[in-house]
Image (spheres, helix red, strand yellow):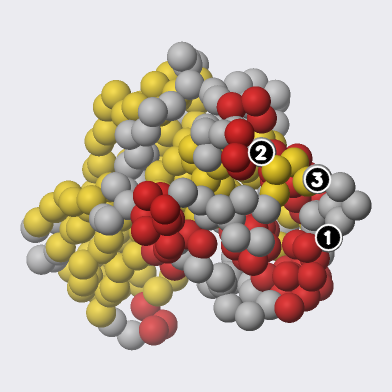
Amino acid sequence: MPILTIRHLTTYRYRRPVAFGEHVMMLRPRDDGDQRVLDAAIEITPGPSRLSWTRDAFGNHLAVAAFAVHADELTFSSTTSVDHAATGFDRDEIAYFARTFPFAYPAEDRASLTPFTTPIGQHPDVERWAAGFVAYDGPTHTGDLIVDMTRTIKRTCRHVARHEKGIQSPTETLQRASGSCRDLAVLMIAALRSLGFAARFVSGYLKVADDDDSLTGGNTHAWVQVYVPGPGWVDFDPSSGAIGNKDLVRVAVVHDPSAAIPLQGSWFGSASDHIAMQVAVKVTANAAGPDRLGRASR
């Protein structure tokens, strides 16, 4: 299995020294069956007065830093090495009862899947669009439906870098036919949940090639996991149309994207004190050489 090394650097700059409140980090990748963290380190400057680690209800790693100093710059540098195994989606592994849509999740799974089957508001246009993936003149293969939806979003919606906070509504993304990776993921989740699928939001890293086509580079990224009886949680990326986890490193899986913010915190001063926040990400695979950070596109 390849070893992926991820460096995630966030820098906040201010016009004068300011005070800092607690900062919550979701930067450490998950330990799942197909990815295992080998080494993880985080450097925070200025150093926090307290740094604590915990896990949330979904098994995501959280770190909380508190500060007792003032500074005009605050940096978080996370470096992680992950043993990563690429996994795809074998339709033959789908449990027999679930191979044709619609199907019902077994009673023993429903309680744990409830957060991921709850509809995302009322979006009639999205529901009608999702229904179009169901064949009414014959059986609909479950695997084909999910793959077709993933690749249709890729084909019909433009993936753009959108730096505004928050998520577009699924209806807005469908109408605009464009959105960031997180917008396209939420559109797909809303559509799948309207059909009864368990689908969750995934936040993490995408390994991409640098401009010189070497095997370096990287971005923060968002995509979708769908619970399919048999194979279990499977990764689908509507931004690229990719099926499976190749080049994807999971950091957080959540029922709602607001629970998967990589870094958030507070500071105390005048609004004019804030100059900028800069984020850079680099993902390398068994590669050595000089660091060259690529900008995050979330």
* 181 or 95, nearer to the observer: 95
Mark 1 Cα within 10 Å, few/some/many (few <14, many 20+)? few
Alpha carbon separation for disc pair 1 and 2? 18 Å
Residue visible at 9% across and 58% down? 49
The vertical placement of 35 against 233, above or below, is: above
Q: Which residue is mark 1?
A: 132
Q: Which residue is mark 3?
A: 139
Q: Nearer the viewer, residue 251 or 94?
A: 94
On the question of residue 50 being in view, the answer is: yes
Front-most of residues 44 and 223: 223
Badge 3 element: loop
Left or right of 28 in this view: 167: right
**Of all residues shown, which one is farthest toward the bottom?**
270
The residue at 26%/41% (across/down) is 42
> In the displayed structure, does residue 84 sit left or right of residue 160?
left
**Residue 259: image location, x then y, percent:** 39, 64
**Amino acid on which disc 2 is placed:** Arg
